[in-house]
Image (cartoon, rainbow, N blue to C red):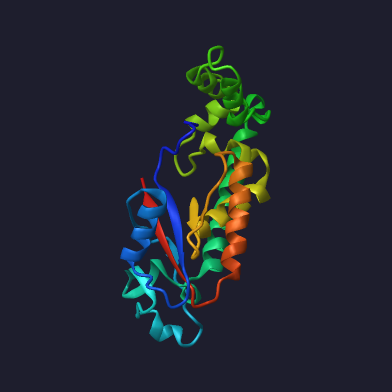
Amino acid sequence: MPTNTPLTDQVVTVVFHPGEDADWFSASEKVNDLLNANGTPARRFHVRHRRFIGWITRFLDYYLLDTARRFGAITKAAGGRKSRLDLNGAAAAAATQARLRWHAWNQYMNSTPATARPARPWEDYLAQHQADPSKVTLNEARRRFHAQPRVIAMLASAGNHEFDPAELTAYQAGEHAYAGLHWRMAIVGDLLITAEGKVLKPSSDTIADRLRFLNEAIKYLRTLKPSARLCAVTIA
């Protein structure tokens, strides 16, 4: 259900300069100091295995935090040195899954004339509430949003593909926009704390502001040296 505040946990990516202490305690301390929140490690980074030496290093967890293994080999980690994290692989995998989900959504929406027509995004109804809360309560704004045939169809989705109405704007923006949102999220998460102690986050919950934030965060990550460290933290 669309809301002004997150209903699920958020992932914060914490960045450390090369040579800094970058253990779990240091990451959680930054999150607590800057966001006033407690967190747990999020094993969301794919681990990079080089072509030849990777046959050995895939079993070693040096420069990695809170790893997960499969058949003894490390597959994911909550963080580590940038050079050991497969950020490109994570982005490619997320983009592929998002494209498949978008095509399933598009086929599902076009299956009946009632849902083929684009729906108004949640932001429009939220703006009505914010313009005159006495006339349009938050519950009324939600009711109007959910009453649209396309949103009803998304709420009714089940099985292998459950479509989140909160992502309606991204779905309706097209395949490339939807995939672009999700591959960026796979790398950055929901917020980013820079090595300099600056918090990067969306200025609002709209898809446009989330994409602006993600673009800024991706640009920052690209400037980091391979020896910089990243850590993913889940906060409630």
The residue lying at 39 percent from left, 77 percent from top is: 63
Whether residue 189 is visible: no
Taking depth in this image into account, of 101 and 235 the one nearest to the observer is 235
Taking depth in this image into account, of 60 and 140 the one nearest to the observer is 140
Which residue is most to the top?
135
The residue lying at 62 percent from left, 53 percent from top is: 180
Residue 147 x, y percent position in the rendering: 55, 20
**Residue 196 to residue 2: above or below:** below
**Residue 166 to residue 63: above or below:** above
Residue 71 x, y percent position in the rendering: 32, 73
Relative to 41, is 82 on the left or the right? right
The residue lying at 45 percent from left, 87 percent from top is: 53
**Residue 3 to residue 222: above or below:** above
Residue 21 x, y percent position in the rendering: 37, 73
Whether residue 121 is visible: yes
Numbered disc total: 0
Relative to 74, is 115 on the left or the right? right
Residue 109 x, y percent position in the rendering: 61, 34
Quadrant containing the C terminus in the rendered view: top left
The residue lying at 42 percent from left, 53 percent from top is: 34
